[in-house]
Amino acid sequence: MGLSPVHFFSHGSTMMLGEESTSADYWKKCGDEALSHNIKGVIMMGAHWDARGDKIMVSANPKPNKSPVAYVHPSKYVDYELVPDLPTADKVLDLLLKAGFNAEKDATFDWIHDTYLILIRMFPNGCPPTTIVSMNAYYDPHYHMKVGSSLRSLRKEGYLIVGTGGAVHNLYRNVWWPMVKHRDNFAQVAPPESPLLDFRQAVEDVMTQNQGPALRRAMTRLMKHHYYREAHGTDDHFMAACFCAGAAGDWEDMEEQGGVLGAETWELQNMCNSQFTIGNWQGSRPVRASA
């Protein structure tokens, strides 16, 4: 088996679970393609679970609950059965330990919307076996890039690696009143602010114009971009991008298809939910959502 693709998905607000969008269409198409290639499971890093100190955690709760989701009807997620992959959790833990990380399993972690929102949208008919890896609370981009590179070999075994965070995700910049008053997260009452448009373009350039080790260097360097702090009020939603660059940034990846922007959805005026795929399934074309 060749290398499976790597997805960096911007999950956006909780309402992305309940509302239809081109991003949701793209997530579904990527899920359908993964199932057609008989994936063994999904390895995910989200943006809402971090470990303190120098630790990194691997989800190992055999019966995880779901954290509640605001502004989404419970029928959209309550009955969706999560499928934790405990054998793969052991495999992931072993790879992280061999790479020198202070890694542990967490048998009590309950899943959060950043990951199960994506799983529901990708695989509405049933969750595949899934392992979630935490961030580290120091939010070092090189650390999270190394986490991805340490798990890269799982792409050769039929696992799908997914990072879920945000291309532009600054809650302090969002315009919330259309969502709070009218339950309308897509009401663009004004254009996005210029610094956020600039950073959004920088993310696309990094993802689509770099491959192999250059992708890793460019992605971690984005945290020095002059508009990074405008686009990310906190660092948590950018770590998954570094994780994905690590998983898809080896010299061997120079032979694979480069990154593509498959879909994009703006919400809350200033939140840009860009959906990227690096690589593809052997012999297939890149998947794009319908216009």
Image (tube, helix red, strand yellow):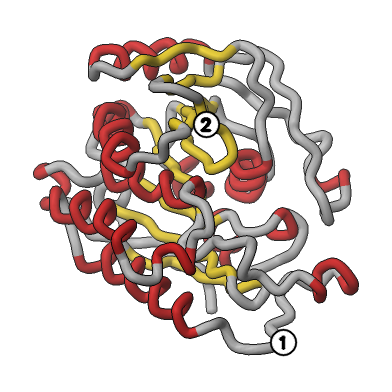
* Quarter of the figure that contains the N terminus: top left
The numbered disc on residue 2 is: none
Task: Count neighbours of disc 1 (C-alpha within 10 A) and say few if under 14, some if 14 to 19, many if 20 or more.
Answer: few
Name which of mark 2 and mark 1 comes first in the sequence: 2
Q: Nearer the viewer, residue 88 or 242?
A: 242
Q: Give the alpha-carbon distance from disc 2 to disc 1, as whole Å.
A: 34 Å
Residue located 52% across and 40% down the image? 46
Q: Is residue 164 above or below residue 263?
A: above
The numbered disc on residue 50 is: 2
The spot of residue 185 in percent (x, y) is 74, 70
- Residue on which disc 1 sits: 189
Q: Secondary structure at mark 2?
A: strand
Dividing the picture into quarters, in which one does residue 109 lie? top right
Task: Count neighbours of disc 2 (C-alpha within 10 A) and say few if under 14, some if 14 to 19, many if 20 or more.
Answer: some
Determine whether label 2 and label 1 are within 8 Å by CB.
no
Q: Secondary structure at mark 1?
A: loop
Q: Nearer the viewer, residue 144 or 3?
A: 144
Q: Is residue 267 above or below residue 117?
A: below
Q: Amino acid at mark 1?
A: Val
The spot of residue 51 in percent (x, y) is 50, 25
The spot of residue 274 in percent (x, y) is 48, 65
The spot of residue 207 in percent (x, y) is 29, 62
* Quarter of the figure that contains the C terminus: bottom right
Q: Amino acid at mark 2?
A: Asp
Q: In this view of the protein, can residue 247 be seen by the observer?
A: no
Residue located 9% across and 44% down the image? 251
Q: In this view of the protein, can residue 165 be seen by the observer?
A: yes
Residue located 43% across and 51% down the image? 238
Q: Nearer the viewer, residue 216 or 279?
A: 216
- Is 33 left or right of 107, judged from the image as shown? left
- Is 57 left or right of 201, judged from the image as shown? right
